[in-house]
C-alpha cells in the first residue's frame, strides 16, 4: 500500500546497465532490450527527406541565448555535440518575435539575429560532416514559438493577448495588452 507522502517515482541514479537490471529484479519488472542498435544507424525516409539514421534529438531549450535572442557559445556547443550522431535535430523553442519570448535568454528569429542563427545551422551541419563525412546531413527542424499570454521577454510577465478568455485571463496576474 502506498502512502500519500510516498512517490511512485524515483530519480534515475544508475551508472551501468547492470544496476538497472538489479533494480528491475527488485521491482519484479521486465525491461527487455537489445545490444544491437544497428537498425537505428540505417538511413530513414520520413516526409520526403532521407535521414542519415534514426537517432533524433528532441527540442531542449537551453535558455542560453543573449538578451537579443542570439545563440551564444553554450548554444553552439550543444548543437555541435548533437550533430555528432543524430539524423534528426529538432532545434529548441525559438521565438518568432522578441516580445513573444518566454524568457530573456530564449533564442529568437529577428532580422538582426539571422546571421547568428545561420551560423548555428552551418556549424551544426559542419560538425556532423566532420564526424561522419561530407554525405552526412542531419535534418534540422526549427520549433517556432510565441508565448503570447505567457510572454516574459524581460523576465517579468508581459502578456500579449489577441483573444481574451475568462478562464485564462483570470490566471494572469498582470495587465493585459
Image (cartoon, helix red, strand yellow):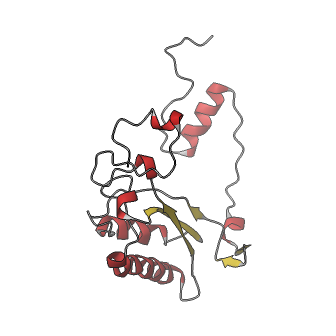
Residue 141, position as x, y percentages in the image: 55, 70
Name which quarter of the figure residue 76 lies in: bottom left
Residue 70, position as x, y percentages in the image: 32, 70
Residue farthest along the bottom direction in this orientation: 134
Residue 13, position as x, y percentages in the image: 46, 38
Query: Which residue shows up at 48% across the image and 80% down it?
Result: 125
Q: Is residue 93 above or below residue 168?
A: below
Name which quarter of the figure residue 135 lies in: bottom right
Q: Is residue 31 above or below residue 125?
A: above
The N terminus lies in quadrant: top right
How many labels sit on residues?
Answer: 0
Q: 8 or 155, which is in the foreground?
A: 155
Let me know if residue 12 appears in the view.
no
Q: 107 or 156, which is in the foreground?
A: 156
Query: Which residue shows up at 33% across the image and 69% down it?
Result: 71
As drawn, is 17 to the left or to the right of 98?
Answer: right
Query: Which residue shows up at 55% across the image and 11% down it?
Result: 3
Q: 15 or 97, which is in the foreground?
A: 97
Residue 121, position as x, y percentages in the image: 45, 78
Q: 146 or 38, which is in the foreground?
A: 146
Let me know if residue 23 appears in the view.
yes
Query: Which residue shows up at 59% across the image and 13% down it?
Result: 2
Q: Is residue 56 above or below residue 52?
A: above
Q: Is residue 144 above or below residue 120?
A: above
Amino acid at each position: 500500500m502506498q502512502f500519500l507522502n510516498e512517490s511512485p517515482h524515483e530519480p534515475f541514479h544508475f551508472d551501468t546497465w547492470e544496476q538497472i537490471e538489479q533494480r528491475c529484479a527488485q521491482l519484479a519488472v521486465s525491461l527487455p532490450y537489445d545490444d544491437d542498435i544497428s537498425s537505428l544507424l540505417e538511413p530513414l525516409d520520413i516526409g520526403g527527406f532521407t535521414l542519415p539514421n534514426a537517432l533524433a534529438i528532441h527540442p531542449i531549450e537551453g535558455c542560453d541565448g543573449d538578451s537579443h535572442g542570439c545563440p551564444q557559445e553554450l548554444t553552439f556547443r550543444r548543437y555541435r555535440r548533437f550533430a555528432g550522431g543524430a539524423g534528426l535535430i529538432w532545434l529548441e523553442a525559438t521565438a518568432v518575435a522578441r516580445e513573444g519570448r518566454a524568457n530573456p535568454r530564449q533564442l529568437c528569429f529577428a532580422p538582426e539575429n539571422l546571421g547568428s542563427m545561420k551560423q548555428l545551422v552551418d556549424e551544426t551541419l559542419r560538425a556532423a560532416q566532420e564526424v561522419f563525412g561530407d554525405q552526412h546531413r542531419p535534418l534540422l527542424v526549427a520549433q517556432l514559438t510565441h508565448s503570447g499570454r505567457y510572454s516574459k521577454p524581460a523576465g517579468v510577465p508581459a502578456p500579449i493577448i489577441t483573444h481574451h478568455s475568462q478562464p485564462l485571463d483570470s490566471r494572469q496576474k498582470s495587465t493585459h495588452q
